[in-house]
Amino acid sequence: MATKKAKSPSKPISVASLLRKHFRISNLHQLVTASRSFPIAARVDLQCALLDILEARFQVTHRSGVQAGYAFQTFTFSMLSLDRDHAPVIAPLEYEDVDIGEAVPVRCLKSTVWLCNQASRRLAILLTPVLKHNEVGGWQVEIAMLPQGKDHDFTDDILHELERQINQAQSYRGKVISLEQRDNYSGKAGGVRVHKLRVVTREQVILPEKTLQLLERNVSEFIEHREQLHKLGMSIKKGLLFYGPPGTGKTHTIHYLASQLPDHTTLLITADQVGLLDEYMQLARFLQPAMVILEDVDLIARARTSMRNSCEEGMLNKLLNEMDGLREDAALLFVLTTNRPEELEAALAARPGRVDQAIEFPLPDVDGRRKLIRLYAGQLQVGDKVVATIVKKTQGASAAFIKELMRRSAQFMVRAGGTDELDAGHVEGALDEMLFAGGSLNVKLLGGAE
């Protein structure tokens, strides 16, 4: 009995052969292409806009993923047109979940090619990540077609419509985001992270009245009048510097501002992310109006004489240029914070156009400490006498110290088996542990008075 010969596995179909069949040509060098690149944060909106355009304008005859055995650079139609070993081949569609801060992430395509017809035109569209040293630095759309009439106008129209829809998109607009840095430093971002900051109300911002008025004039009132100022030819970019001892409410106030500006995208930049400053600025302009937060700015904007290399000075110069308005004006609000204003580079702290208003966050006064005690007491019952005792014993302490004192006092109360009412003994026990048991270093770490 003859044995049945096993079928050999089918050979993968190269993208080049697919393109030749679609365009009905043998030499793919006849094709003309146009492309546009977009930042990482535009990925979701780019896919939505591209799918809308494809559905509205074209008849899609083929859609598939694209893979290659060795892919260390961005896929382009020039690369896909090559017939060689390990040439790109068509593959199943691949998806990746992208978090945009909603309940469900968005499923986004990876490298994908579409073959389309529009009347007598045939074209191919390629969506692919922009790879640099095998790392994603953005997303690219490329259009390939045979020369026919005003090709430039035709592809430009598609790409302009793509940009228009992306600029109106809402995926990250109005949210609090930061860029994720790659493990190996390359000056490029690895993705976008959406933050869920706690909501802070006006009553929870415990600052001197003059400080609050200054804050509101330079933030909420400025933003309210921004459009009118723009019509008068005034700059709509503003730089603020929050300074004061640690634990006095600078970060807390930033949470308040983010809560009060729902139409603004808030970008959080940490000191170790200054290498991503260029990408952050591109993202801020893309998602404007935006509030750009750079905490502990003294870590990069210190005196030039204390800088270790030209790279650090370059980061400072880039920050100064963005704040000084060398690029086109945009609806950006810069908020810089520092615990050590004396170490800031003079050009940042004093040069008009870099910082428009410095706002001091002082240690809380008597009235401020009383309000902080009530704020951080939570569900505790604290009598007026106990409040007066705490106010007296926390002179020179920060808001952060008072917050921890109330939690530590509550712990002493719970351990003693008491009710929800705090007494002086609980407070004394907490103060002794915070001020004396841990030594002088503990006092500094907690923001207590020396």
Image: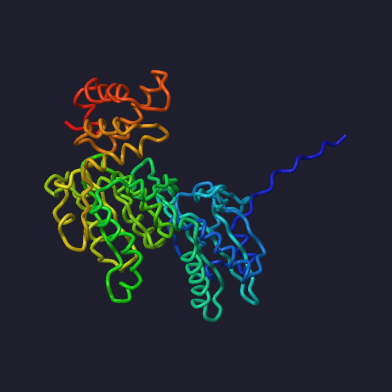
Image quadrant where residue 218 sits: bottom left
Q: Nearer the viewer, residue 411 or 385?
A: 385
List x then y, in percent, for residue 395.
20, 35
List x then y, in percent, for residue 338.
23, 46
Q: Nearer the viewer, residue 4 or 371?
A: 371
List x then y, in percent, for residue 323.
25, 60
Which residue is outermost to the left?
A: 305
Which quadrant: the N terminus?
Answer: top right
Q: Nearer the viewer, residue 264 or 348?
A: 264
Colouring style: rainbow
Relative placement, left or right, of 161 versus 293 is right
Q: Nearer the viewer, residue 74 or 381?
A: 381
**Number of numbered labels in the structure image:** 0
Task: Relative to 102, say whether 115 is above or below.
Answer: below
Image quadrant where residue 425 sits: top left
Task: Relative to 383, say whether 71 is above or below.
Answer: below
List x then y, in percent, for residue 115.
62, 64
Which quadrant: the C terminus?
Answer: top left
Which residue is outermost to the bottom?
A: 149
Which residue is outermost to the top?
A: 416
At a point 56% along the width and 78% down the height, the residue shown is 148
Task: Relative to 59, say whether 360 is above or below.
Answer: above
